[in-house]
Amino acid sequence: MSARLEIEWEAERVPGAEEMLQTIADACVRAEGVDLPVYAQVRVTGNEEIREMNRTYRSTDRATDVLSFPSTNAKPNHTLGHTPQKLLRERDETGWCFLGDIIISLERAKEQADEYGHSLQRELGYLTAHALFHLMGYDHMNEQDKERMRAMEEKALNQAGIGRVTDDELIAMAKEAMEFSYSPYSHFRVGAALLAKDGRVFKGCNIENGSYGATNCAERTALFKAVSEGARQFVTIAIAAEKSMPWPCGICRQALNEFAPDLRVIVACGDEKGEAMLPELLPHGFGPKQGTLDFLAKE
């Protein structure tokens, strides 16, 4: 079932954020299993306004990152996915059900994005998911409820393609994969960690062969492992090596483009890091999304 966000920007508008937050809202509703069309109002503001609201409604005189004000009431200890009939009372003239209001401080979101080492969009996405699950009846007053709510947030964020795997964690996993490298000929060990849109991470290393031509790079090892496990959409790949920056070879760029033409590529060697989008590394690339396989569909 679909969800809709009505977003009002009192703070500066973040490019691309509205589309991303809408994707997250849809993922939250799917994760919860709500079977009615629902919507929420989101107000992106600053610390001053959210502090005033926090003081007025929660008797807490400080700026927080996000506030949520539910308009629906689930049964005690139940969430809206288990009591969808409650939503019927909140339907407007168009048939949509109003979940409530979400207030986000853009200033706090920026601070937390810097603190956690991820993008502002990622932080806004997490705060929106957190608030939406509050609107649907989740809470974190005790450890059990906190774990339950956290699991739902992660499920939705992974479905939306912005799971909480950080760049540093992905690089660390690539370095772990590098330890299994089979490279007796080049002595150039490489490891890769490929983040799928559903939140799974697939690791691979380079595997050399005495014929040289049968050698497989770490990127393709990770990719082929992922595809063989049912993954088809990917967000980021981290590639690590010890001797120099391991930018992917042409064959790997083409293989990755087959499934993820908008892939984010991170490379690391020691403390040095580099980043590029796959289209920068493979300009004018070709693959299914470029229509080069149309002739197969016509036969």
Image (spheres, rainbow, N blue to C red):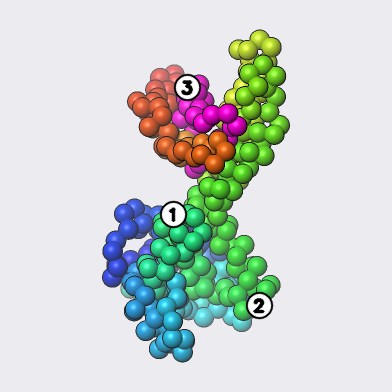
Q: Quadrant of the C terminus?
A: top left
Q: CA distance from mark 1 to mark 3?
A: 29 Å
Q: Amino acid at mark 3?
A: Gly
What residue appears at the point 65 percent right and 33 percent down from the top-left corner? 178
The front one of 29 and 250 is 250
Give x and y (percent) for residue 137: 55, 75
Give x and y (percent) for residue 78: 61, 75
Kindly identify which residue carries mark 2: 142
Dot 3, crowdedness within 10 Å: few (<14), some or many (≥20)? few
Q: Is residue 141 above or below residue 237?
A: below
Residue 43 is inside the magenta segment: no
Kindly identify which residue carries mark 1: 119
Q: Is residue 288 above or below residue 31?
A: above
The numbered mark, 1 or 3, whose residue comes first in the sequence reads 1
Q: Is residue 203 above or below residue 66?
A: above
Count of numbered circles on the image? 3
Kindly identify which residue carries mark 3: 250
What residue appears at the point 66 percent right and 36 percent down from the top-left corner? 177
The numbered mark, 3 or 2, whose residue comes first in the sequence reads 2
The front one of 243 and 179 is 243
